[in-house]
Image (cartoon, coloured by chain):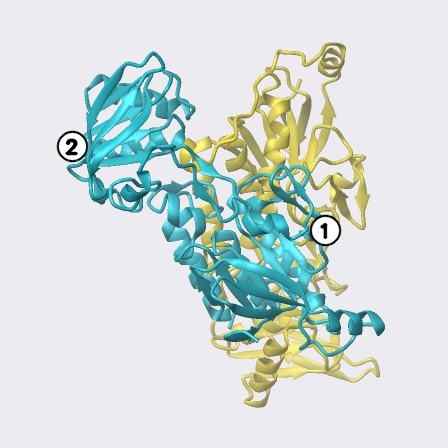
Chain colours: A yellow, B cyan
């Protein structure tokens, strides 16, 4: 036995917006939930990567900042008293075999208190549950780290893979590396308060929305941003994690030294499914294939929703993940309440606790 | 030619929450929309049947009144300048055949200004468009009208099938007929301000949420509501549309006369697909069958979303209709912009106009 064994109806892996809404949907169907997330905060990518950015396509919110959305979703889930396990990863999922045999042996075995899975976290906590919803977004994602000698000692001090608060960069010399949306958007945003913003990119073309590209050009024209093209990161110079210089190089070997307080490498997120990839689930191009009618994976009792799930026509939109959460909860209901027919009710009739 | 011929990219039939959000999703993909609704207000059932009721399962809103939600969705759609045709029904949908032949004849015929359909409204307006989204909820729904002689002359004066504003019933003697959620919920709600509330039902059991049933019992116990059971509506007495008495009867012929200012018959909505049923679409039990990956109906170019659409696992939840609207818009994009690849972007990157 481990340190601690807990019991719930549904374990939700991932505390991003879609995982949080799945707590609510499970709760509306009288199912308790525990939520596990590798990050030490709720909100997933929304909270970690762009907390202050407005989102425009949450239905009913013409605009809402990512972190506000997370707070609202947490409040919506709160009446159902979810238990959060943050800063923990799922290490192991195993079936409680005895239960399974019993269930197979009789028609709809009635003891609904019998769990079907044991989920073990990186802190050694064991959670028994009847169903699992994977809402892990890009997986326990990590940033693509540029291959620079000694970069580890700067990480978290003067090298950051995400911006938590713009204010942290006020008055600083900032080197942004990358050519995608994040690089361009943050260059535009930080140019308003940084002392200097360099954008290092290996080619003149940026992979971003045309309007953003035009704004970056305009800022470069007015000197607010300096485009360092076609350069790539080559080395870091500094002391005890405090950056002084970012060395960049062309393919021809030309070198420039950029005085810098901060380096923001935006080379995207590595899609790391991590342990999920080992669970024997049907996987297609790093996503978990699900039945769109139920969000069921190839493993009975395990469901996947949000960005990590794929099916024909799948859109990686938060609002679609919300719908998937509702559908998964309805599909899970008979696993948790095997002898109760589900009486479909509108929330306006049923209310919340 | 008719009075007026208009042109757009997508005609959306139904201005309920799902139709409104489809305007936004179409707009995010550079597609213009016209919206037609038989009601003279936007919001569909939300606005017509329960404007003041809180909804608890709109993601990101722990609680929002139905009418507030409609207003937010309208504001969210507004930047894309939709054209609303309210108080109009769709009378006819026809294909513009010449266009079709041209498109079939060449690979991706490039003139994207060529429409595919003509939609004719009950006011004789013709709207040309490239795709149609049916978001008609329960169809152009009507209430189930009790078979009482002369009821028409009271309708809209002292017989109402929906409550627009509770305040209209302050100090009135109200007879509510029916045994479902609407009857029970409105009895509870109106008991707070009406002079007297009768609930006429043919049997003792109500078809409602257990909590609501318990509250109704409690109100009956305290005399705030009088349950008239097992009675059914029999006749109306009054003058020039102003009700004085509702006559009710048991199956055994026992009669009671209830003094009444207002009768609210809540016998549900008749699912009237109306003209939709004649359009040759695949129909299953009064719903339009769609491909869940695209929300496409059996007719190319015609899509259905929200409560009127059905597919395996379908839930009639507003939040699922939102997701369907996004998926339908993405599926329609190549019909409107046949030569442009769709560059998937998050709203937070793309912004809104």
Residue B188 is situated, as x and y percent measured from the top left of the image, at 28, 30
Question: Residue A175 occupies which quadrant of the picture?
Answer: bottom right
B227 is higher (above) or lower (below) than A107: below
Q: Is residue A170 left or right of residue B189?
A: right
| Observer able to see residue B153 | yes
Which of these two is toward me, B63 or A193? Answer: B63
The residue nearer to you, when weighing A323 against A82, is: A323
**Front-lying residue, B61 or A33:** B61
Quarter holding the N terminus of chain B is bottom right
Chain holding disc 2: B
Q: Which residue is mark 1?
A: B298
Q: Which residue is mark 2?
A: B195
Residue depicted at 65% across the width and 21% down the height: A2
- Check the residue under mark 1 and report the chain it is in: B
The relative height of residue B214 versus residue A305 in the rendered view (above or below) is above
Query: What x and y, as percent, mark residue A272?
Result: 74, 49
Secondary structure beneath dot 1 equals loop
Q: Is residue A26 above or below residue A320?
A: above
Is residue A302 positioned above or below B42 on the image? above
Decide: few, some or many residues near mark 2? Use Cα within 10 Å; few <14, some 14-19, many ≥20: some
Extreme-bottom residue of the structure: A221
Going from N to C along the chain, the mark reached first, 2 or 1, is 2
The residue at 71%/34% (across/down) is A91
Q: Position of residue B239 (x, y in %)?
A: 19, 40
Q: Is residue A44 visible?
A: no
Tag 1: Cα neighbours inside 10 Å, few (<14), some, or many (≥20)? some
| Residue A12 image-quadrant placement | top right
Q: Could you confirm whether marks 2 and 1 are on the same chain? A: yes
**Separation of marks 2 and 1 at Cα, in angstroms:** 53 Å
């Amino acid at each position: 036995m481990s340190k601690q064994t807990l019991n719930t109806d549904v374990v939700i892996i991932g505390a991003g917006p879609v995982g949080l809404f799945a707590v609510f949907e499970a709760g509306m169907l009288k199912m308790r939930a525990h939520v596990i997330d590798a990050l030490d905060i709720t909100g997933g990518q929304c909270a970690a990567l762009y907390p202050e950015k407005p989102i425009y396509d949450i239905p009913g919110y013409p605009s809402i900042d990512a972190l506000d959305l997370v707070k609202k979703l947490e409040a919506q889930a709160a009446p159902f008293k979810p238990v959060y396990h943050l800063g923990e990863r799922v290490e192991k999922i195993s079936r409680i075999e005895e239960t399974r045999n019993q269930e197979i042996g009789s028609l709809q075995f009635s003891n609904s208190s019998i769990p079907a899975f044991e989920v073990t976290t990186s802190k050694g906590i064991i959670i028994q549950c009847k169903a699992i919803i994977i809402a892990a977004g890009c997986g326990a994602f990590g940033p693509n780290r540029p291959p620079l000698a000694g970069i580890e000692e700067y990480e978290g001090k003067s090298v950051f893979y995400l911006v938590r608060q713009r204010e942290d960069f006020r008055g600083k010399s900032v080197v942004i590396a990358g050519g995608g949306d994040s690089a361009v958007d943050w260059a535009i945003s930080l140019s308003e308060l940084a002392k200097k913003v360099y954008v290092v990119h290996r080619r003149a073309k940026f992979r971003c929305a045309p309007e953003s590209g035009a704004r970056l050009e305009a800022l470069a024209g007015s000197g607010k941003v300096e485009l360092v093209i076609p350069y790539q990161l080559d080395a870091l110079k500094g002391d005890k994690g405090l950056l002084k210089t970012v060395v960049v190089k062309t393919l021809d070997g030309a070198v420039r030294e950029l005085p810098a307080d901060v380096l923001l490498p935006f080379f995207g997120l590595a899609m790391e499914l991590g342990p999920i990839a080992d669970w024997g689930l049907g996987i297609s191009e790093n996503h978990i294939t699900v039945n769109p009618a139920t969000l069921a994976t190839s493993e009975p009792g395990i469901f996947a929703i949000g960005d990590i799930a794929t099916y024909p026509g799948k859109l990686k939109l938060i609002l679609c993940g919300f719908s998937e959460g509702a559908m998964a909860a309805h599909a899970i209901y008979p696993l948790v309440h095997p002898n109760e027919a589900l009486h479909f009710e509108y929330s306006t009739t049923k209310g919340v606790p």
